[in-house]
Image (cartoon, grey):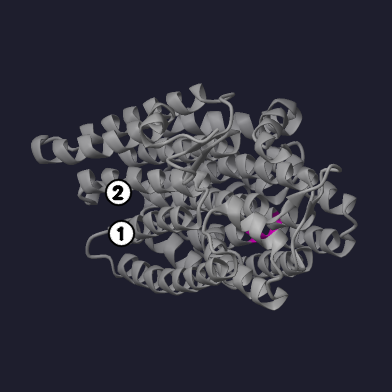
Amino acid sequence: MDFGNLASIKLFYPEIALASTVVLLTILDLLVAHKRALAYIGMAGALVSLGFTVDLYGTPPALLFHQLVVLDNFSLFFKVLSLVAVIVAIWMSISSKEVAQLHLGEYYIVLLTCALGMFFMASANNLLMAYLGLELVSLTSYILTGMLPHNRRSTEAALKYLIYGGVASGTMIYGMSWIFGLTGSLDYAAINTALAQTGASPVAIYFAFVFILAGFGYKMAFAPFHMWSPDVYQGAPIPFTAFLSVASNAAGVAILIRFFYSGVATLAPDGNWTFPEMPWSDLIMWLSIATMTIGNLSALNQRNVKRLLAYSGIAHAGYIMMGLVALNTAGLNAILFYVVAYLIMNLGAFLVVMVIANATGREEIDAYRGLARRGGGFAAVCMAIFLFSLTGLPPTAGFIGKFLLLASIIQAHFYLLAVIALLNTVVSLYYYMRIVKIMFFDEPNPADPQIHTMSSAVPLLGVFTLLTLVFGLYWSPLLTYTQDSLAFFAK
């Protein structure tokens, strides 16, 4: 169903709620003396938007604003993820000593605007809209990365992020111009039809897709577009780093799947996908191998936990890409499941990082030495469970997610990729378990302070830990939810 501008507004409530919150915060920032209140208003606006988003589940798929935006369960799935991530980021920000140094009004305004950009990345049905959504997320991310005052590391990270982002953006829009020249349209459906009917040069189509993939891959941080990630993770405030690590990755997955599987590929009756004139599986397989291998090997010698989690995130982007190699619906479903599992365990891990940073002012692994004996037993146990899940050990959500990804590629006979993924998991076991060993078995330094887990962090840590274990033991509800979110692609 295709809606015009006015008719689309009645299905656009989540975006309207989030945009209205941004406007309200902008006004209140000029009037309210106690800026801490802005955090609660921002969180309330995000919760209202989340309520509207959940209420739209089950609505028949529709094209809004003359086919610029699509409403379906797939886009709603990623909007929910973005909202959960921004709500957790705001919750963390309230207790963060780093964020307390910032201009809080501007911080919350830009953070919610970034989440709004992710909405459009997930629901774009036109390359121009996809580009605008991605740029909105990128520009706000540059600002948030460099927001720490008088912090050289933060400023350097923002500058590097801006340079890498500009190059990736230019490369992507160059590829989009090729697609427009080849098909005469920026609309996904029109591109799909034109590619199936016209005799365009396979080489031209291939290079156009590679250029576009570079821009989308930059948001997912897969090799060779990953170089910004460690510096940005280390330089940005921890709550925003946590948000960026999961929401940016998820938005990159959404925009990539939406364009390449909805706008380019064709779904066969057997549930498999075909791409026109493009060796998609081979290209993505080698990118996946390079990404997971570079991420894991680079993480081995890291001493800063935020940088280690950045390289871990690169490796996980490689695992996620395995689901794209399979060219079947099972692979896409595994991706959605893994994205949810990664959101839970990575937000939990960054919450522990913030607890330690608040207590010690440090982000190095040495700050975790003897954590379980320094009053941080609860945080240490939670961190260990998150690290087990990031490794892919049972009984955790990370294990189920990785199992589903491996099953999808084995079903498609990509045995080499499965073996390399398993070997990479063994490599990751070393650097994750090194942190566990330091927390529980190493003697604390006499100068290390006692760790008292903040009261605001305890409920979140408990929820994330519980979900990590529950979805590792009883995953069928989440699997059903992700399958329903792919209904758009099954038609």
Residue type beneath disc 2: Val
Q: Which residues are magenta?
A: 315-319
Q: Is residue 254 above or below residue 27?
A: below
| Left or right, 344 with reference to 198 | left
The local crowd at label 1, few if under 14, some if 14 to 19, many if 20 or more residues have their Cα within 10 Å, is many
Can see residue 438?
Answer: no
* Residue 27 at x, y percent in the picture: 15, 38
Q: Is residue 203 above or below residue 161?
A: below
* Residue 64 at x, y percent in the picture: 46, 38
Q: Which residue is mark 2?
A: 110
Helix, strand or loop status at disc 1: helix
- Whichever of labels 1 and 2 marks the residue nearer the N terminus, that label is 2
Q: Quadrant of residue 288?
A: bottom right
**How far apart are the two marked residues, 1 and 2, measured between alpha carbons?**
8 Å
CB atoms of marks 1 and 2 within 8 Å: yes
Helix, strand or loop status at disc 2: helix
Question: Magenta segment: does it hold 317?
Answer: yes
Residue type beneath disc 1: Ile
* Numbered disc total: 2
The local crowd at label 2, few if under 14, some if 14 to 19, many if 20 or more residues have their Cα within 10 Å, is many
Q: Determine the residue positioned at 45% across, 36% down.
A: 83
On residue 143, the disc is 1
Can see residue 457?
Answer: yes
The residue nearer to you, when weighing 295 against 215, is: 215
| Left or right, 292 with reference to 146 | right
Q: Quadrant of residue 16?
A: top left
| Left or right, 313 with reference to 404 | left
